[in-house]
Image (cartoon, rainbow, N blue to C red):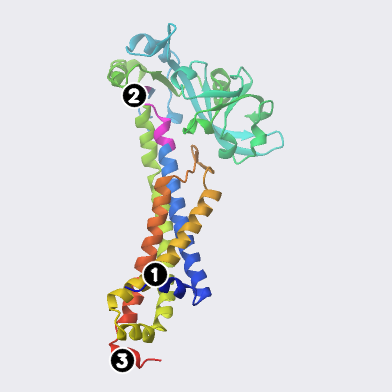
């Protein structure tokens, strides 16, 4: 076998070719890492947003969208009395009436962006225990509480949604009373107002849903039986986790498009790299023949050529990993119903390394075979 130092020295024969190979590999690896991180982030936030212990009572026929659902306000009291297995703390059962409402949110300077509003009472904190008030207070009438990532979802500056500032909802000026966190869920991108305020703004006499928190996920059958028995209420019972699974399936085409885009760019870079190596290896046919004449086998030479390409590609992968950690890790990406945080974790890093290895090996084998294909006496006479 040829020593690895031979491959290392050959890398610097043409600095232009080396920069092209490293740059192309880095671009492809960075795109693949970004695609993996974005897909993981979106899947993670949707799967974490739904609890299997929570059951959502929505209007029959509105299982695909809570925003379109209409449920009688008396449903909460009836469900509280009629469903067994509801979680209870200090004698208060975890049942929350909510309105989900998409509307434009304005700032005093005239900027407007569409965002998700949720009308709640204090009971919402019992069914969504992941919500934690990190600054300010729970909203009273004429006030709202914003998720800590709402500014990103709305495309605003974080200073625009600080406690004490105001926003405009349907022409009404609302003060920001607090900021809440719900790590890893879409709730962090929402704005919460009181149920009564949002009922007036949405001009509705019903609520969107009633959320029940159960002691055990297995108690779902009790809630489902309640919804089927009370035909007068026209209800459907959904596990909250199942609802967000459906949303995840709805966004699957978007994730597929991310992969297709990354794949097309990777294919273009791969073919460009192959062309570059064809030109580079074509000028070394006589050199390879000379090495064969002094005793090195074609397999050894093929391995050395692949080593050169792989080292350049892995260098690009390392560069892409550094860029990904610096520019992508921790960045918040908004999408239609919320926002998620990109994380460059071990799986993403391993994917990047494997992509660089794949580019180096696959891109070098065809031109290397062509370089070594001529017979020895014909290759030695080549210029």
In this view, the residue farthest toward the top is 91
> Mark on residue 4?
1
Q: What residue is at 65 percent from the left and 39 percent from the top?
A: 157
Residue 143: x, y in percent? 63, 22
Residue 330 in picture, x, y percent from top left: 53, 42
Q: Nearer the viewer, mark 3 or mark 2?
A: 3
Total number of numbered discs in the rendering: 3
Farthest residue to the right: give it: 109
Quarter residue 267 falls in: bottom left
Label 1 residue SS:
helix
Given contact means CB atoms under 8 Å apart, are the residues at marks 2 and 1 in contact? Answer: no
Q: At x 29% / y 92%, what residue is drawn? A: 377
Crowd around label 2: few <14 · some 14–19 · many ≥20 (10 Å): many
Q: Residues within 10 Å of mark 1 (few under 14, many from 20)?
A: few
N-terminal of the pair, mark 2 or mark 1, is 1
For residue 236, the mark is 2
Q: Residues within 10 Å of mark 3 (few under 14, many from 20)?
A: few
The magenta segment:
45-55
Q: Quadrant of the C terminus?
A: bottom left
Give the residue pinned by disc 3.
Answer: 378
Of residue 248 and residue 208, the one placed in the foreground of this image is: 248
Point out the frontmost of discs 2 and 1: 1
**Does residue 309 sit above or below 321 in this rendering?**
below
């Amino acid at each position: 076998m040829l020593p690895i130092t031979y491959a290392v020295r050959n890398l610097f024969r043409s600095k232009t070719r080396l920069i092209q190979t490293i740059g192309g590999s880095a671009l492809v690896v960075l795109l693949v890492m970004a695609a993996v991180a974005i897909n993981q982030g979106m899947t993670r936030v949707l799967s974490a947003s739904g609890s299997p212990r929570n059951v959502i009572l929505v209007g029959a026929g509105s299982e695909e969208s809570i925003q379109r659902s209409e449920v009688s306000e008396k449903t909460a009291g009836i469900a509280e009395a009629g469903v067994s297995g509801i979680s209870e703390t200090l004698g208060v059962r975890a049942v929350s009436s909510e309105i989900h409402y998409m509307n434009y949110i304005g700032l005093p300077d005239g900027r407007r962006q569409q965002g998700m509003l949720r009308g709640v009472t204090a009971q919402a904190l019992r069914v969504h225990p992941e919500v934690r008030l990190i600054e300010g207070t729970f909203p009273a009438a004429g006030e709202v509480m914003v998720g800590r990532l709402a500014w990103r979802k709305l495309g605003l500056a974080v200073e625009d949604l600080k406690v004490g500032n105001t926003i405009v909802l349907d022409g009404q000026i609302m003060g920001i009373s607090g900021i809440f966190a719900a790590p890893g869920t879409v709730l962090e991108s929402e704005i919460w107002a009181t149920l009564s305020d949002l009922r007036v703004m949405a001009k509705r006499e019903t609520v969107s849903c009633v959320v029940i928190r159960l002691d055990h996920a297995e108690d779902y059958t009790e809630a489902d039986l309640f919804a089927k028995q009370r035909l007068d209420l026209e209800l459907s019972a959904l596990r909250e986790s199942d609802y967000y699974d459906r949303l995840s399936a709805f966004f699957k085409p978007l994730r597929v498009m991310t992969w297709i885009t990354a794949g097309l760019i990777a294919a273009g870079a791969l073919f460009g790299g192959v062309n570059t190596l064809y030109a580079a290896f074509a000028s070394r046919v006589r050199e390879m023949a000379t090495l064969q004449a002094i005793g090195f086998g074609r397999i050894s030479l093929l391995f050395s050529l692949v080593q050169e390409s792989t080292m350049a590609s892995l260098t690009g992968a390392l560069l892409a990993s550094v860029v990904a950690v610096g520019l992508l890790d921790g960045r918040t990406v908004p999408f239609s119903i919320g926002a998620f945080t990109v994380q460059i974790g071990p799986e993403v890093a391993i994917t990047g390394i494997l992509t660089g290895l794949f580019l180096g090996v696959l891109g070098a084998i065809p031109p290397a075979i062509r370089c070594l294909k001529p017979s020895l006496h014909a290759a030695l006479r080549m210029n």
